[in-house]
C-alpha cells in the first residue's frame, strides 16, 4: 500500500519545457572566437572548439576525483573563465563573475534554436501547490544557463526548491544528487515522486533509490521500445513506474 504523494520532483528540460540547442554550430564558435578576441584572448576557430572540449573533460574529471561520482557535473563557468585567462590577456575584466555570466548568456543565446514552455506546466504546478503539495526541480543542467530559463518560463516562484547539477557537482542518476535535496527539505521517499522524460537519468535515479516515478513518454516510444529501455537501464522496480503517453502532465493530477 503506497502512501499519498506529497512531494513532486520534476526534471526541467523535456519535462516542463521543450528546448533545442546546437552547440556544434559554426556560427556559434565564430562569434565566440570574436568575443574572446575582443578581450585579448585570440583563438583560431578550430583551436577554440578543441580547447573548449578539452577543458570540459578536464573539469569533469577534476570534479569526479573530488567527489567520487560516476556522474560528475562541472561548472561551465570555470571553462569560460579558463578560456580567457589561459591566453594571458594584458587586462582581465574587473568583475570576472559578471563577465562569466555574460559569456554564458551569449553562448546560450546563439546556440539556442528553440525554447517553449509546455502549456500544461504552469497550471499543473499551480494546481499541485493549491492542493498543498510540495514541488521541486532536480535538473541535469548548467546553473549559468538554466536559472535564467527557469525565470523565462515563469516557473521560479512555483518551486519549493531548485537543484541544478552543476551547483552540486553531481548529476542524475547518481543518488547523491537526489539525496541532498531529500535531506535539505526532510522529504519522505515513500511520499515523493520523480517525474521525467529520460529513462536513463530520471527513472533510473528513482529506481536506484527505490522510489516511485512517472515517465513522460513525450517522444512516443512504443511499449516494446520502453520495455527494452527498462532492460538497458537496469531498472529493478518497473512496477513503481507510471507511464504517461504523449507526455500529458495533467495526468499527474489524478495521482495528487
Image (cartoon, rainbow, N blue to C red):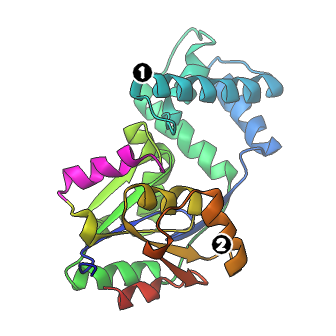
Instruction: Please tell me how many numbered marks the rendered image carries.
Output: 2
Residue at 65% from the left image edge and 72% from the top image edge: 227
- Element at label 2: helix
Q: Is residue 238 magenta?
A: no
**For the magenta stretch, what is the residue range?**
172-186
Residue 232 location (% of width, % of height): 65, 58
The circle drawn on residue 174 is: none
Badge 2: residue crowd in 10 Å (few <14, some 14–19, many ≥20): some
Q: What x and y, as percent, mark residue 63?
A: 47, 27
List the residue tagged with mark 2: 226
Res. 212 in view:
yes
Q: Identify the residue at horizontal 55%, vertical 29% (top origin).
A: 60
Mark toward the viewer: 2 or 1: 2
**Front-most of residues 99 and 228:** 228
Residue topped by disc 1: 94
Res. 221 visible in picture: no
Q: In the drawing, does residue 80 fall left or right of residue 125?
A: right
- Residue shown at 53% from the left, 61% from the top: 235
Q: Residue at point 22% right, 85% down?
A: 131
SS of the residue under disc 1: loop
Q: Relative to 179, is 45 above or below?
A: above
Main secondary structure found in the magenta portion = helix
Amino acid at each position: 500500500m503506497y502512501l499519498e504523494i506529497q512531494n513532486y520532483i520534476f526534471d526541467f528540460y523535456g519535462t516542463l519545457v521543450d528546448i533545442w540547442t546546437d552547440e556544434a554550430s559554426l556560427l556559434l564558435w565564430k562569434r565566440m572566437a570574436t568575443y574572446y578576441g575582443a578581450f585579448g584572448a585570440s583563438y583560431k576557430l578550430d583551436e577554440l572548439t578543441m580547447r573548449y572540449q578539452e577543458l570540459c573533460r578536464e573539469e569533469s574529471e577534476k570534479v569526479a576525483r573530488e567527489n567520487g561520482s560516476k556522474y560528475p557535473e562541472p561548472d561551465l563557468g570555470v571553462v569560460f573563465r579558463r578560456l580567457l585567462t589561459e591566453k594571458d590577456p594584458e587586462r582581465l575584466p574587473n568583475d570576472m563573475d559578471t563577465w562569466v555570466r555574460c559569456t554564458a548568456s551569449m553562448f546560450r543565446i546563439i546556440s539556442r534554436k528553440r525554447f517553449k514552455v509546455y502549456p500544461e506546466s504552469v497550471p499543473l504546478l499551480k494546481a499541485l501547490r493549491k492542493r498543498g503539495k510540495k514541488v521541486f526541480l532536480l535538473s541535469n543542467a548548467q546553473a549559468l544557463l538554466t536559472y535564467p530559463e527557469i525565470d523565462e518560463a515563469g516557473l521560479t516562484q512555483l518551486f519549493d526548491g531548485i537543484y541544478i547539477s552543476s551547483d552540486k557537482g553531481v548529476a542524475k542518476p547518481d543518488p547523491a544528487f537526489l539525496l541532498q535535496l531529500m535531506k535539505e527539505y526532510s522529504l519522505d521517499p515513500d511520499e515523493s515522486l520523480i517525474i521525467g522524460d529520460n529513462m536513463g537519468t530520471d527513472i533510473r535515479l528513482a529506481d536506484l533509490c527505490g522510489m516511485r516515478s512517472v515517465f513522460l513518454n513525450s517522444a512516443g516510444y512504443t511499449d516494446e521500445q520502453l520495455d527494452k529501455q527498462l532492460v538497458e537501464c537496469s531498472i529493478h522496480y518497473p512496477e513503481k513506474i507510471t507511464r504517461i503517453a504523449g507526455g500529458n502532465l495533467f495526468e499527474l493530477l489524478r495521482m495528487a
